[in-house]
Amino acid sequence: GPILFNLDGGPAAGSYSLQAADDANFNIGSFDSWSLTIESLSFAERFQGEATDNEALGFGIASIELLDDACNVALNVDPFTPGARLVIYEVSLVNPQGCGRATVRVTDLGGNTCDQVVTLNGVHCGPGDVNHDGAVDFADVGPFVAEILAGTGSCETDMNLDGKLDGLDVQPFTDAVVP
């Protein structure tokens, strides 16, 4: 088969398979898993998560949720029965042009919690790039002011990353604007 670096720069669409062979005699081994990571500037990031409760006296997973600090993200959880030991979930961007962040909380049936902070980059995102054009400039001023006044907006408006859109975001935004 082809050497993987020969695929750099090519289209990511297609089918992928891995062929593994044991060509030695009298040895014992195992193959547990494999994965493929495709990186591109042309599509938004996603976070693939696994919630596990493998403790001998554990109760299993009860819920997986986004906390109130979530911005521009959606949570998709594979169907599971409460008490499951493994649950797969994914966090993706609602607007793939922008940035996103969230805290995912996993709760077990015993009431114990575990938080996972997730930060995702879209195609064009970054602090201050409110219009998602790849630059923080005067074109962002109008949308920035509108979002601050409305008290709602994108992750890009929360310049000091405190989870709130308020006057404390104005100075960092002003400092970031390139004329």
Image: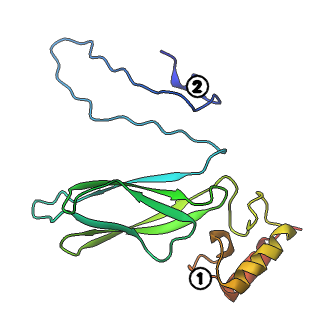
Marked residue nearer the N-terminal end (1 or 2): 2
- Would you say 154 lies left or right of 80 here? right
* Residue 21 locus on image (x, y percent): 30, 17
Q: Is residue 136 visible?
A: yes
Give the label, 1 or 2, closer to the camera: 1
The residue pinned by badge 1 equals: 164
Reply above or below: 122 against 177: above
Q: Residue at x 65, y 71 (%)?
A: 154
Which image quarter: residue 7? Answer: top right
Image quarter of residue 5: top right
Q: Residue 163: x percent and y percent?
A: 56, 79
State left or right for residue 133 relative to residue 154.
right
Q: Nearer the viewer, residue 19 or 80?
A: 80
Residue drawn at 53 percent across, 66 percent down: 101
The amino acid type, in three-letter code, at marker 1 is: Lys
Toward the viewer: 106 or 126?
106
Left or right of 80, for residue 100: right
| Residue type (three-letter) at the residue carrying disc 2 | Leu
SS for dot 1 = loop
* Residue 7's disc number: 2
Among the 4 quarters of the image, the one containing residue 49: bottom left
Cα separation, mark 1 vs mark 2, equals 43 Å
- Residue 169: percent from left, percent from top: 69, 81
